[in-house]
Image (cartoon, rainbow, N blue to C red):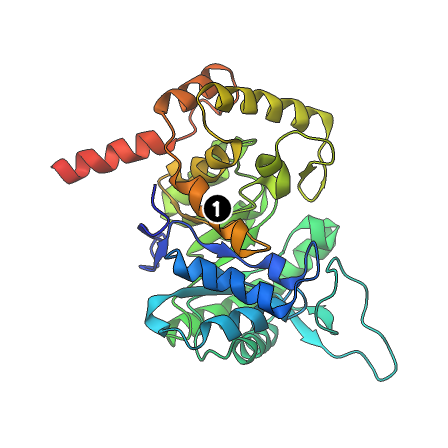
Amino acid sequence: MKATDLRTLGRTGVELTQLGQGTAPLGDLFVTLDEVQATQVIDEAWSAGVRFYDTAPWYGLGQSEHRCGRALYRRPRHEFVLSTKVGRYLTAPAPGRTPAPTIWKSGAPFNVVFDYSYDGVMRSVEQSMQRLGLSRIDLLLIHDLDFAYHGTEASVAAYLGQLKTGGARALAALREQGVIRGFGAGINERGMIARLLGLLDIDFFLVAMPYTLLDQAILDDEFALCEQRGVGLIIGAVLASGILGTGARPGATYNYAPAPPEIMAKTERIEAVCKRHGVPLAAAALQFPLGHPLVASVIPGALSAAHVQQNVHSLQTPIPAALWDELRAEGLLHPRAPVPAARDAVAAAATAR
């Protein structure tokens, strides 16, 4: 596979490089980065031909967007695709008060307000464009409207209602006016794709965690809905927040927490198969989602230029079809999980015709 190959995202008509750059780490997710290090991540991705960059106001409370903007705004605008997110906007704490604690190691000194209303979406977009230094955004995502962030059915339902009566209208207007080229939603857990498709005319989903080399149960229900609607997919958290990059070693993380014993055991079995075929685990993990016909891009994050280089190398590592066959035979892949070798064969046949 080549990092620079283009794939169309669902019905948006937007073409993405099949390797994109996730930028949550540029918000100081794991460690505090200096400005040079952060810029080097984007510069290295650009040098490798990556032309899709994903960010969000939440990442470092605006810091990731600032860093992406500084690294990209002098690049030819028609040469790259940028996505950011709505559902939160940022406010300054009251004088003499410190911002509320967050997951970010440092980040900018702001508080977060969840808001999926018409005004909330428009306010978020305006703030993002100013941080990015860009007058338009290609793709916009509804961010973190799920139970992990909102806790209860009552809270999730209330925000879905806010989205239905206001935010959906804002997203449709922005798309119609050409401010954005398409809109979607970021998904961290199963169940929300169906609910969101029932509310609005969504173009694509960015799926983090429910579809990785470790878990493909979502194929049984919600991905089938996406196929019926022609809704595109982008896959985030491709390395399952760590363990598919590091392997099942002490301290490995899964879903941003210590990996549980059953995940450690399954990862060890997948690693053993990869080793028999001479393929690094990270390469199999990065390439696997791209076997699905709806997946346009995978967007691993990076803390350094070296991490970007590793991701590019992993994507371009040859993987024999026999590896996928053995994983399926061992019960380590969903019986109907599409794999890259099959997608490549279909593409080759289409070209031959």
Q: Dividing the image into 4 quarters, which one contains the N terminus?
A: top left
Amino acid type of disc 1? Asn
Query: In the rendered image of this protein, does residue 290 appear above or below residue 220?
Result: below
Total number of numbered labels?
A: 1
Which quadrant of the figure has residue 260? top right
Residue 303, how many percent across, how many down?
60, 55
Q: Which residue is pictured at 68% across the width and 57% down the height?
A: 29
User: For this rendering, which residue is in front, 284 or 126?
Assistant: 284
Q: Would residue 45 be seen by someone viewing this image from the given angle? A: yes
Residue matched to label 1: 311
Query: In the rendered image of this protein, does residue 311 appear above or below residue 247?
Result: below
Q: Would residue 201 be seen by someone viewing this image from the given angle? A: no
Residue 209, how many percent across, how many down?
58, 42
Query: For the view shown, which residue lies furthest in the right direction?
Result: 96
Query: In the rendered image of this protein, does residue 174 appear above or below residue 276?
Result: below
Q: Is residue 239 left or right of residue 340?
A: right
Q: Dividing the image into 4 quarters, which one contains the C terminus?
A: top left
Q: Which residue is pictured at 52% across the width and 45% down the height?
A: 194
Q: Which residue is pictured at 34% across the width and 52% down the height?
A: 4
Which quadrant of the figure has residue 166? bottom right
User: For this rendering, which residue is in front, 292 or 257?
Assistant: 257
Residue 227, how many percent across, how many down?
38, 42
The crowd level at tag 1 (other Cα within 10 Å; few <14, some 14-19, many 20+) is: many
Is label 1 in a helix, a strand or a loop? helix
Q: Is residue 162 left or right of residue 311?
A: right
Residue 328, how many percent across, how many down?
46, 19
